[in-house]
Image: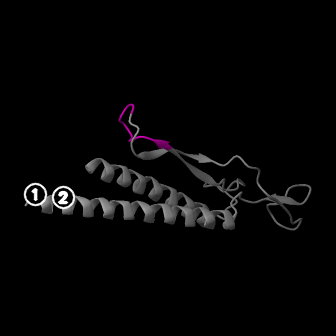
Amino acid sequence: MFGTLDVSASALRAERVRMHTIANNLANLHTTRDESGEINPYRRRTVRFQVGLPGVRGSRQGVHVEQVVHDSSPFPKIYDPGHPEADEEGYRLTPNVHPVVEMVDMLETTRAYEANLTAMEATKGMITRALGLLV
């Protein structure tokens, strides 16, 4: 029974990382410069999950974050010739973050988190009832 709790706990940790990544994407929706001030739009990040517990070779239970990767989709161009970040043709690059996509991902992440909390509560209830039978 405790293995079930471990599986749900691993999923909660993974979904927390995913939610943080989505929040970071939304926070940088309009970021067009890097830390050094150079024109370099923020590139959207996504989370890759992998089956198994981290550090446990051959584990097929649970899930963990394999890595957070950059979305390779092209940066949208906006025609704005008067903008200081515009190129010679009058276009400027903007981050490849789409708020609607991020909100849908956030809802999906929230639902997955809630489902794992429910599974943990059900498991905890079964453990409590099983221990009650022993007493």
Check if residue 51 falls in the magenta segment.
Answer: yes
On the image, the x and y values in percent for residue 84 come to 81, 64
Relative placement, left or right, of 22 versus 131 is right
Q: Residue furthest right?
A: 89
Mark 1 and 2 residues: CB-CB less than 8 Å, in contact? yes
- Identified at 89% across, 65% down, the residue is 81
- Which residue in the structure is indicated by mark 1? 134
- Identified at 60% across, 55% down, the residue is 35
Relative placement, left or right, of 18 versus 116 is right
Can the viewer see residue 30?
Answer: no
Q: Secondary structure at mark 2?
A: helix
Relative placement, left or right, of 84 versus 96 is right
What are the residue bounds of the magenta stretch?
50-58
Disc 2 residue type (three-letter) = Ala
On the image, the x and y values in percent for residue 76 come to 79, 57
On the image, the x and y values in percent for residue 30 come to 68, 66
- Which residue in the structure is indicated by mark 2? 130
Can the viewer see residue 70?
Answer: yes
Q: Which mark is residue 114?
A: none
* Of the pair 67 and 113, the residue shown nearer to us: 113
Quadrant hosting residue 42: bottom right
Relative placement, left or right, of 4 versus 12 is left
* Of the pair 135 and 11, the residue shown nearer to us: 135
Q: Residues within 10 Å of mark 2 (few under 14, many from 20)?
A: few
Q: Could you tell me what secondary structure mostly forms the magenta stretch?
A: loop
